[in-house]
């Protein structure tokens, strides 16, 4: 195995370091020795003059077998590192383009009095003539491109140019994922890695020819800002050497086909949780693109890469034992509602086995408001690799930190406020030609502006039809083809590649393709496809591909076809067989990741920023309903679910009904939060940190109002719904309305149910009028009609008798709730569902059977309909991509309640093979039809004959199994009765939202051993039987009657610190023996002296000086005063009664 093979292998490094710099192998042993013995560089001083925190890592115990593999890994890293030196290179010629020159002062080195020659005007004329000819040529090429035809000699080559990690969603709940992570660490299968989540925008860079990219776009102000910040980071790191190193860096990325991803944090691109104090970026990923599947560097490799190039790294913690991993999650639970950067980093530093501080201190550059943490599973060897990297690559000094770096990002944006193009030009001019010599991605080429770069829509079709020249192209075609066939909500936008403009011809076309996923559900659905087809490449976030379409001569075409076939045969199995696991980790385990956000951040973004539209549109009352519901969805503790109404009043008083921009919301929110935080410690805990507002109004970048590069200015479900709705746990006031709607499929009996509800005496039990609107009888836009009717009488209960199958309809219902002051409750047929659909085939068969028995249906969907089966399949596929749990979770989160209508008997026999076969045939036929004809009627497509035959078979099969289909259904009368009971409970507020599988956390205050009151009462009776004074005390205080709970405190967050509380995470939910050896009491309080036992051989110790269980306190006496009982007893002010022999009971260790 070569030294550049695999860093993650237990025996040798993966790619490390031979590609990390323009390095070369030294030809002499002496140079190698010199490289190894180079003195370690100290970390750069902070701007405030203090030293940064030292790098911290702590070796952990391991077994012999693991120690052996670790030694191999370390040796594998050390060998190539020892052979590395910086390659001597000729520095680029010095020139004004490589140095920063103030705006308006840029001049040629030859400029000066008399420097201009008579040939200047002639040269300019020639250049203009050449430019005009080039522009005309390109224009004609662009116009002719749509006529480019794909034939047998057409080939295509596609190369990924920039990408970020795939968006992976765990199938399990967060709590289940956390448990699995701890199990993997406990069994020595993996380590847990945690990093800070800086609050900014995704920026990717692949060199000045490779391009600069935002999340879903390029050639705009987002990428210009990113290039400027990256260039400035080089100036700060390298000082006078910056132009040279910028050029080398660009060249290195290009030669090795590498892209870097960064979290770009600035104050000029709109508000997140807190305006950063400085504009900066942190490298979050380094990706080798090569000519196959992208390979992401491990975190140790990323740190080595960044320290070689002096780029900023993130703060990283590694947890390699069960105790540390359990303690991490407990620490987060203790800090989730009030955590800010300083206490979070401090707690994790104390808990982690290895802590690597970031080169940019979050508090200094961004502030105290911390968005969150990202926890993911990494290989077991990562600890050894990290230690090796930290030894070989110390934190470098920054040569330019005290030098003049030129105008800042904010100064440039402030000086160029006329339009976006002016700001972009100023930013790129100031960053210099060594960093960005080519501006064509922003301003076009050869006289054609950037707007001319849009290519026609046929490019994607031609790309899919052309012969692939290599493996990567084949896999990208496979991915795009599947996404289009499944009608995933994604765009494949193609643009002319201006970097390849000189190579363009009528038979040789170059494009940039942007794969823009519109909805997060696409990633989930694509993951399901990957589970079925292990060879599929992942769907990445930030996905940019260079595409070349070209014609080949007959001879060349034959060679390409032959080479391509051989390549695919050799590589297809080999690469994909290795893609299902990462160094021994099962694929689902290697992707385990959870994002853990803090309330102090969510309060600003999701509750204030994203709620502004609700505040201005529907008023403070609706806004309060909105944010209280959201906090309940998060599982926020009750003490935090208040006070934002004051914020709403403040903003409305100042702005009236004029909406406040979500991109600058902190201009109003931050001063209010600062004043609010000063009023009390509890307010300060809620807000986290406030003040020191950075004013952005004068330098905010000119942003397209319709463009949101990160996607977080829009509302996401589960994060910030667009309109307020009451939760089912709230009593619906009699003056408010209720909307009952049906996310179902034709045949689910919604119309029959609505009739039964209308005919029920007393309605839903609160005398509000009932009103039903049947969709089949409404002409025109049904949901608009519902909204209009509700505005007339908003207090009544509306039965929306129409299928509501998608998120677009749900959004309209949410809007109606806000505009007409109503709650909404979905009624869904109860069904087990499948992995990709909330309704099972059994349910679909019953729905079809019911529809085919109808006669004279108002919507003409009955036995006389020739396409009835097709229509039901169409509705069935509207839910495609959501499992039953995902479907119910989303409805719970949007509307706060869910009513289930019984459908199928739980003890039914399996679906007959004939019924299952005909349904499978119909689903396959539907997908074929949809892929070719979209939503066209089946009788008008190329499968018209097959549809007619299938509809006949469907009828024969279902009616042939009529007895079975009738027998498996819950009687309609029983279903109606159960639905009515649930709806009445919703109307009264008695129906609580059940656990949807999502983790609900509280703000942990302390760790304790919970005791059973009955055990304590039994103990006290035994003591009182032997001591009459104790018996008298118990009778007078009625302690046995008042004792409802008891515990032994182990550690308290305020008194002992977060890390101390979190350290008990490994023992959570474990039984602990507790021995009591004395009873202490006075006329004001009583407690039992406790001695804690062991769990799995490990002694449990309390951080309290006197472990005890407080039993009783008189009115006005706080429980913590019981800590004084031993001292009071020594002074004769309290009674101590020994318990001999000690009595032992069992308790459960938990957090509170």
Image (cartoon, rainbow, N blue to C red):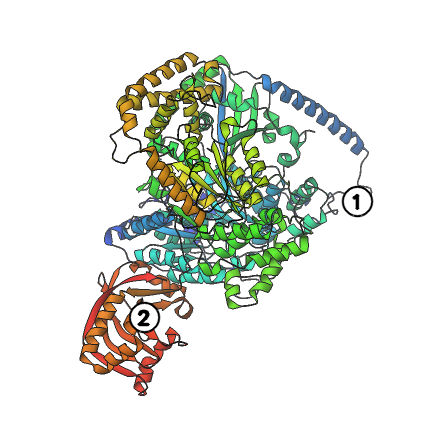
> Could you say whether the residue bearing mark 1 is in a helix, strand or loop?
loop
Q: Quadrant of residue 783?
A: top right
Asked if 404 appears above or below 740 in the picture, the reply is below
Residue wearing tag 1: 112
Q: Are marks 1 and 2 in contact (CB under 8 Å)?
A: no
Number of residues whose C-alpha sits closer than 10 Å to that of mark 1, classed few (under 14), some (14–19) or many (20 or more): few
Q: Quadrant of the C terminus?
A: bottom left
Along the line of sight, the residue nearer the viewer: 994 or 125: 994
Q: Residue furthest front?
A: 761
Q: Can the viewer see residue 543? A: no
Callout 2 secondary element:
helix
Q: Is residue 526 left or right of residue 618?
A: left
Quarter holding the N terminus is: top left
Q: Nearer the viewer, mark 1 or mark 2?
A: 2
What's the residue at 27%, 75% (across, down)?
1089
Name the residue nearer the viewer: 237 or 817. Answer: 817
- In-image side of 71 versus 742 (left or right): left
Q: Residues within 10 Å of mark 2 (few under 14, many from 20)?
A: few
Q: CA distance from mark 1 to mark 2?
A: 95 Å
Q: Is residue 96 above or below residue 544?
A: below
Q: Is residue 815 left or right of residue 950?
A: right
Numbered disc total: 2
Q: In the figure, 95 relative to 61: above or below?
A: above
Q: Nearer the viewer, residue 77 or 618?
A: 618
Label whose residue precedes the other's in the sequence (1 or 2): 1
User: Residue 1013 appears at what percent x and percent y?
Assistant: 27, 66
Q: Which mark is residue 348?
A: none
Badge 2 is on which residue?
1042
Where does the image place residue 272, in percent across and percent down from the top left? 56, 51
Where is residue 408? Give x, y as percent. 65, 52
Picture quadrant of residue 1026: bottom left
């Amino acid at each position: 195995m070569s030294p550049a093979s695999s860093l993650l292998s237990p025996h040798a490094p993966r790619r490390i370091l031979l590609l990390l710099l323009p390095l070369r192998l030294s030809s002499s042993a002496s140079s190698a020795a010199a490289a190894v013995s180079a003195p370690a560089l100290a970390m750069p001083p902070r701007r405030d003059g203090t030293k940064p925190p030292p790098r911290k890592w702590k070796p952990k115990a391991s077994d012999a077998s693991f120690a052996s593999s670790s030694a191999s890994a370390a040796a594998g890293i050390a060998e190539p590192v020892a052979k590395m030196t910086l390659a001597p290179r000729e520095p680029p010629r010095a020139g004004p383009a490589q140095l920063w020159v103030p705006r308006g002062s840029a001049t040629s080195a030859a400029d000066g009095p008399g420097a201009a020659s008579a040939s200047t005007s002639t040269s300019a004329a020639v250049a203009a003539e050449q430019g005009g000819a080039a522009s005309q040529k390109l224009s004609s090429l662009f116009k002719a491109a749509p006529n480019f035809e794909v034939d047998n000699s057409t080939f295509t080559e596609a190369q990924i140019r920039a990408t970020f990690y795939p968006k992976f969603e765990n199938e399990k709940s967060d709590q289940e994922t956390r448990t699995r992570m701890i199990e993997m660490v406990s069994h020595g299968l993996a380590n847990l890695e945690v990093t800070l989540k800086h609050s900014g925008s995704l920026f990717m860079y692949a060199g000045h020819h490779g391009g600069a990219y935002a999340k879903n776009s390029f050639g705009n102000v987002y990428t210009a800002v990113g290039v400027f910040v990256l260039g400035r980071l080089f100036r700060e790191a390298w000082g006078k050497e910056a132009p040279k190193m910028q050029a080398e860096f660009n060249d290195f990325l290009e030669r090795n086909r590498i892209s870097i991803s960064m979290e770009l944090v600035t104050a000029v691109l709109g508000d997140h949780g807190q305006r950063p104090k400085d504009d900066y970026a942190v490298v979050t990923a380094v990706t080798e693109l090569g000519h196959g599947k992208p390979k992401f560097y491990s975190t140790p490799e990323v740190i080595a890469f960044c320290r070689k190039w002096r780029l900023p790294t993130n703060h990283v913690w590694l947890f390699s034992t069960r105790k540390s991993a359990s303690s991490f999650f407990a620490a987060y639970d203790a800090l989730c509602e009030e955590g800010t950067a300083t206490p979070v980093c401090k707690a994790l530093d104390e808990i982690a086995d290895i802590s690597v501080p970031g080169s940019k201190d979050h508090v200094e550059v961004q502030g105290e408001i911390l968005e969150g943490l990202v926890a993911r599973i990494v290989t077991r060897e990562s600890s050894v690799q990290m230690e090796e990297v930290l030894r070989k690559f110390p934190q470098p000094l920054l040569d330019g930190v005290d030098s003049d770096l030129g105008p800042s990002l904010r100064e440039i944006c402030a000086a160029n406020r006329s339009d976006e193009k002016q700001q972009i030009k100023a930013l790129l001019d100031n960053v210099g030609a060594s960093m960005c010599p080519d501006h064509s991605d922003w301003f076009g080429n050869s006289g054609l502006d950037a707007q001319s770069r849009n290519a026609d829509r046929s490019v994607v079709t031609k790309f899919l039809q052309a012969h692939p020249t290599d493996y990567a192209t084949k896999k990208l075609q496979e991915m795009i083809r599947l996404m289009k066939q499944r009608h995933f909500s994604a765009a494949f936008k193609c643009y002319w590649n201006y970097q390849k403009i000189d190579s363009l011809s009528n038979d040789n076309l170059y494009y940039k393709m942007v794969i823009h996923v519109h909805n997060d559900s696409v990633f989930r659905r694509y993951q399901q496809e990957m589970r079925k087809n292990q060879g599929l490449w992942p769907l990445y976030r930030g996905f940019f591909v260079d595409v070349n379409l070209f014609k080949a001569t007959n001879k060349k075409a034959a060679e390409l076809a032959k080479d391509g076939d051989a390549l695919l045969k050799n590589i297809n199995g080999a690469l994909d067989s290795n893609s299902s696991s990462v160094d021994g980790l099962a694929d689902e385990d290697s992707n385990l990741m959870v994002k853990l956000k803090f309330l102090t951040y969510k309060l600003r973004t999701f509750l204030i920023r994203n709620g502004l539209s609700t505040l201005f549109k529907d008023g403070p009352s609706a806004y309060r309903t909105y944010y209280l519901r959201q906090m309940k969805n998060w599982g926020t503790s009750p003490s935090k679910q208040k006070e934002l109404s004051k914020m709403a009043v403040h903003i409305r008083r100042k702005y009236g009904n004029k909406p406040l921009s979500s991109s600058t919301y902190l201009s109003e929110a931050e001063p209010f939060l600062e004043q609010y935080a000063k009023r009390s410690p509890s307010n300060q805990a809620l807000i986290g940190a406030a003040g020191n507002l950075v004013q952005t109004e004068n330098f905010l970048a000119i942003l397209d109002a319709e463009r949101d590069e990160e996607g977080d200015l829009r509302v996401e479900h589960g994060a910030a719904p667009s309109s307020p709705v009451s939760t089912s746990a709230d009593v619906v006031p009699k003056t408010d309305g209720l909307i009952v709607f049906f996310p179902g499929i034709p045949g689910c009996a919604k119309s029959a149910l609505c009739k039964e509800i209308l005919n029920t005496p007393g309605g839903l039990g609160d005398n509000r009028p009932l009103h039903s609107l049947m969709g089949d009888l409404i002409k025109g836009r049904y949901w608009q009609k519902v909204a209009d009717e509700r505005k007339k009488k908003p207090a009544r209960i509306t039965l929306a008798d129409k299928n509501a199958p998608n998120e677009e309809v749900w959004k309209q219902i949410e809007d109606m709730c806000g505009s007409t002051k109503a709650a909404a409750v979905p009624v869904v047929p109860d069904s087990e569902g499948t992995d990709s659909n909330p309704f099972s085939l059994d349910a679909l068969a019953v729905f079809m059977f019911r529809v085919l028995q109808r006669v004279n249906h108002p919507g003409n969907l009955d036995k006389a309909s020739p396409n009835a089966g097709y229509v039901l399949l169409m509705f069935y596929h509207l839910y495609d991509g959501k499992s039953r749990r995902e479907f119910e979770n989303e409805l719970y989160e949007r509307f706060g309640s869910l009513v289930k209508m019984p459908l199928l008997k739980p003890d039914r026999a399996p679906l007959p093979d004939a019924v299952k076969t005909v349904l499978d045939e119909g689903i396959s036929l539907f997908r074929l039809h949809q892929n070719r004809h979209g939503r066209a009627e089946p009788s008008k497509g190329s499968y018209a004959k097959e549809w007619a035959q299938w509809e006949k078979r469907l009828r024969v099969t279902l009616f042939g199994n009529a007895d079975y289909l009738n027998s498996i259904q819950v009687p309609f009368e029983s279903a109606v009765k159960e639905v009515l009971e649930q709806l009445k409970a919703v109307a009264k507020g008695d129906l609580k939202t059940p656990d949807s599988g999502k983790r609900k956390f509280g703000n942990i205050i302390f760790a304790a051993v919970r005791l059973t009151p009955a055990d304590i009462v039994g103990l006290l009776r035994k003591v009182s039987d032997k001591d009459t004074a104790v018996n008298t005390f118990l009778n007078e205080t009625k302690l046995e009657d008042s004792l409802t709970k008891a515990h032994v405190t182990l550690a308290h967050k305020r008194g002992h610190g977060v890390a101390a509380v979190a350290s008990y995470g490994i023992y959570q939910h474990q039984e602990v023996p507790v021995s009591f050896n004395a009873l202490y009491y006075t006329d004001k309080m009583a407690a039992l002296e406790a001695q804690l036992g062991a769990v799995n051989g490990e002694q449990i110790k309390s951080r309290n000086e006197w472990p005890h269980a407080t039993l009783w306190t008189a009115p006005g006496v706080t429980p913590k005063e019981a800590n004084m009982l031993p001292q009071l007893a020594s002074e004769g002010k309290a009674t101590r009664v020994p318990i001999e022999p000690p009595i032992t009971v069992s308790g459960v260790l938990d957090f509170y």
